[in-house]
Image (spheres, rainbow, N blue to C red):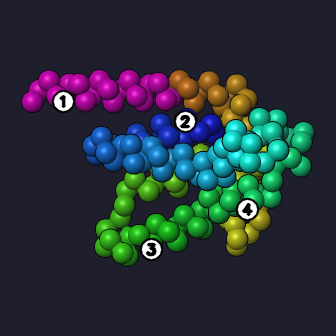
Amino acid sequence: MDIVSHGLWGGIVAGKKNRRTYWTAFLIGILPDFFSFGIFFLATIFRITPDIAWHAGPDNLEIVPEYVTHLYNITHSLVVFVVVFLLVFMIRRKPFVPLLAWGLHIIMDIPTHSSAFFPTPFLWPVSNFRIDGVSWVHPYIFFPNLILLVSVYLFYFGYWRIRRSRR
Ligand SMILES: [Zn+2]
């Protein structure tokens, strides 16, 4: 899924408690992509690497640096997510709910990435098994996602407004 959708879904699913938890979950929702392709884009923007991130796609996978793949494996693994979630749980003695936005990011990426370009390595490093999904740029995914997002946000904005006016 695209990075903006990840933030919006993460915030609404894992950060509904208050404004702070919303933005925390929003940020956590976009981090898996930020700490992989985001770094590649920043490196390109600031001309640290000569690679032109904007042209990275299924036809020229070779221009994607190896570090992006390594980071992608780590940030898009449900195994890594579960370990981190449990560690945080143990340290705080209670779950950190906004962190669920990370798990949600991975789960949403599994069916929305095809084998052609970064299929989700959700079982890394245990297994290399990946699902050949339909890319999120495909209209079958892009528009239903957009409609769902708008509906869910409209619902919650309505709900919050009603709740506030009753106070
Ligand atoms: Zn992702």
Q: How many marks?
A: 4
Q: Considering depth in this image, is 49 or 127 the residue closer to the camera? A: 49
Q: Secondary structure at mark 4?
A: helix
- Tell which circle, 2 or 4, labels the residue nearer the N-terminal end: 2
- Tell which circle, 2 or 1, labels the residue nearer the N-terminal end: 2
Three-letter amino acid code of the residue under disc 4: His
Q: Secondary structure at mark 3?
A: helix
Label 3 – label 4 distance at C-alpha: 22 Å
Label 2 – label 1 distance at C-alpha: 26 Å
Where residue 9 appears, as percent x and y from the top left, is 48, 39
Q: Considering depth in this image, is 36 or 122 the residue closer to the camera? A: 36
Residue 4 in view, yes or no: yes
Q: Quadrant of residue 94?
A: bottom left
Near mark 2 (Cα within 10 A), the count class, few <14, some 14-19 or many ≥20, is some
- Which residue is the site of mark 3? 87
Q: Secondary structure at mark 2?
A: helix
* Badge 2 vs badge 3, beta-carbon distance below 8 Å: no
- Which residue is the site of mark 4? 70
Residue shown at 48% from the left, 50% from the top: 28
